Amino acid sequence: MSKMKNNTERLYDIIKRPIITEKSMEATTLQQYTFEVLKDATKVEIAQAVELAFPGRKVKKVRTVYMPSHTKRVGYTMGRTQSGKKAVVTIEGDPIEELIGA
């Protein structure tokens, strides 16, 4: 029982935030939504997390992209951006109203 609870808690933590860009908003017409996810999340876990976060929708396809960090400079200071992972999720059923651009 505790293992199932830990798995459910992990599913809630997998999706960090939706990525709102011009390109991702155009993809919402095709019912494709872009999310920033944990780096170690698998496609199966991402699909389960989206179905848990947005009930009544079924995930048709998940595509993932690893975003490496880049070197940035501000004045004399050198630094690196944060690396991450994003997922493009195709959904069957009703569109997600919270993520559709107005």
Image (tube, rainbow, N blue to C red):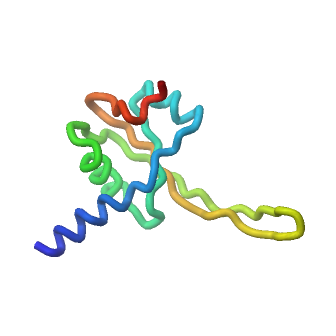
Residue 39, image x, y percentages: 47, 64
The residue at 15%/75% (across/down) is 2
The residue at 30%/41% (across/down) is 59
Residue 87, image x, y percentages: 46, 49
Residue 21, image x, y percentages: 57, 37
Residue 89: which quarter of the image? top left
Please tell me whether residue 86 is drawn above or below residue 25 in the rendered image. below
- Where does the N terminus fall, quadrant-wise? bottom left
The residue at 47%/24% (across/down) is 102
Please tell me whether residue 4 is drawn above or below residue 49 in the rendered image. below
The residue at 39%/46% (across/down) is 62
Please tell me whether residue 22 is drawn above or below residue 78 in the rendered image. above
Q: Nearer the viewer, residue 5 or 64?
A: 5
Q: Is residue 59 left or right of residue 28?
A: left
Outermost residue to the bottom: 2
Q: Is residue 69 left or right of residue 54?
A: right
Outermost residue to the left: 1
Please tell me whether residue 56 is drawn above or below residue 74 in the rendered image. above
Outermost residue to the right: 76
Residue 53, image x, y percentages: 29, 48
Q: Is residue 95 left or right of residue 69?
A: left
Residue 61: which quarter of the image? top left
Q: How many marks?
A: 0
